[in-house]
Amino acid sequence: MSCAQVQALIRSRHAAVLTTGPNTYDRFVRQFGNECDWPEVPVSIPVPTREGECRLYRCQEPVLDFPD
């Protein structure tokens, strides 16, 4: 699929499980929505598509970096 097709699929369904390689998959979500369980937030990652890398969002716990 193209990047635009993948992004449209996720927007229309709010979340989708997609293959990311021969034996791997992941759940991707909209950037703004409530698809992630607390305390997780949508984090942008590069995902391979037909045209190259595409930025999608998946849920993961935020990394808190407090100054010393």
Image (tube, rainbow, N blue to C red):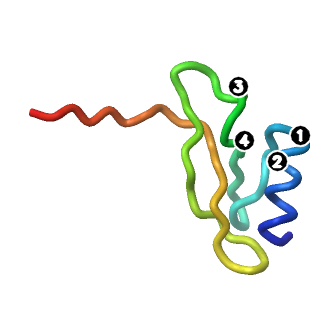
* Kind of residue at badge 2: Ile
Disc 1 marks a residue whose amino acid type is Arg
Q: In the figure, is residue 2 to the left or right of 20?
A: right
Q: Which residue is mark 1?
A: 13
Label 3 amino acid?
A: Asn
**Residue 9, x across and y down, in percent:** 88, 52
Circle 3/circle 4 CB separation < 8 Å: no
Q: The N terminus appears in which quarter of the rendering? A: bottom right
Helix or strand or loop: what does disc 3 sit on?
loop
Point out the tag, 1 or 3, that comes first from the N-terminus: 1
N-terminal of the pair, mark 4 or mark 1, is: 1
Residue at 82% x, 65% y: name it. 4
Q: Amino acid at mark 4?
A: Val
Q: Which of disc 2 and disc 4 is earlier in sequence? A: 2
Residue linked to disc 2: 10
Q: CA distance from mark 2 to mark 3?
A: 13 Å
The quadrant in which the C terminus is found is: top left
CA gap, disc 4 to disc 2?
6 Å
Sequence-first disc among 3 and 4: 4
Marks 2 & 1, CB-CB < 8 Å contact: yes
- Image height of 19 relative to 37, above or below: below
Q: How many marks?
A: 4
Q: Residue at left 75%, top 80%?
A: 51
